[in-house]
Amino acid sequence: MDSIIFDVDGTLWNSTAIIAKTWKRYLSEEEHLDIPLTAELLSSMFGRPLPDIARQIFPNVSETEQLRLIDSCCQAEHIALLAECAPLYEDLEKTLQLLSEKYSLYIVSNCEAGYIEVFLKTTGFSKYFKGHLCNGDNGLDKGSNIALIAQTYHMNSPVYVGDTMGDFLSCRKAGVPFVFASYGFGEVPDPDAVIQKPMDLVSLYY
């Protein structure tokens, strides 16, 4: 193994409470929409491409309006997350520091453009990662982006760390081993490896 690719939500941090509060406030104050958003609801959706989430939250408006609303929510979310860093999982920075001494680290997510940059800026973790890619950057599904970032950075033997069945299936599509972050949002019955906290990666690979 020469590199590790990470998911963000449910793997590196849990931003659902801040995002739910921010989206609900924006929709109420700016769009006059009363939508019952909760952290639990968002955690069940995160990991999917943003247009899929928009369809679920705004089922009664056109696709164009869904995308406008979700984009506006995301802009408000970025401001909120830059002002208040979401909770990081246990010993995350220590984990990244140790792993980055031995491996190249990357991020691939199904999030909107700019979200990974917000994560890196508000945490100060840019120094640990060599690159990142997301659905919002190019419209590609996660499996394609895992394969693309591996090709772009000439990875010979990467692994992917994520927390949902979608992550697992994306890794199968990309031909990359999957490490299941069991502390995250999803359930995966047959991963290649399991961690119960970020530091378990150090035990596995350091």
Image (cartoon, rainbow, N blue to C red):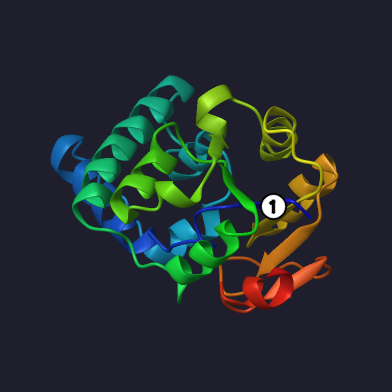
Say if residue 89 shows up in the picture: no
Look at the image and tell me in which quarter the C terminus lies: bottom right
Residue 117 screen position, x and y as percent:
39, 39
Q: Which residue is found at the position 70% from the left and 39% from the top?
A: 146
Q: Quadrant of residue 88?
A: bottom left
In this picture, is 102 found above or below 76?
below
Q: Which residue is found at the position 18% from the left and 51% from the top?
A: 83
Residue 196 screen position, x and y as percent:
62, 79
| Helix, strand or loop status at disc 1 | helix
Circle 1 residues within 10 Å: few <14, some 14–19, many ≥20:
many
In this picture, is 89 found above or below 77?
below
Q: Which residue is found at the position 57% from the left and 32% from the top?
A: 135
Residue 159 screen position, x and y as percent:
74, 54
Q: Quadrant of residue 162?
A: bottom right
Residue 198 screen position, x and y as percent:
56, 72
Instruction: Name the residue furthest top.
Output: 64
Instruction: Name the residue furthest front.
Output: 101
Task: Count all numbered tags in the image, as a single digit.
Answer: 1
Q: Which residue is found at the position 51% from the left and 62% from the top?
A: 96
Q: Quadrant of residue 191?
A: bottom right
Say if residue 169 shows up in the picture: yes
Side of 3 where 177 appears, left or right:
right
Identified by mark 1, the residue type is Asp
Instruction: Name the residue furthest left.
Output: 29
Viewer-nearest residue: 98 or 42: 98
Viewer-nearest residue: 137 or 58: 137
In this picture, is 17 found above or below 68?
below
Q: Which residue is mark 1?
A: 167
Side of 121 where 179 appears, left or right:
right
Look at the image and tell me in which quarter the N terminus lies: bottom right
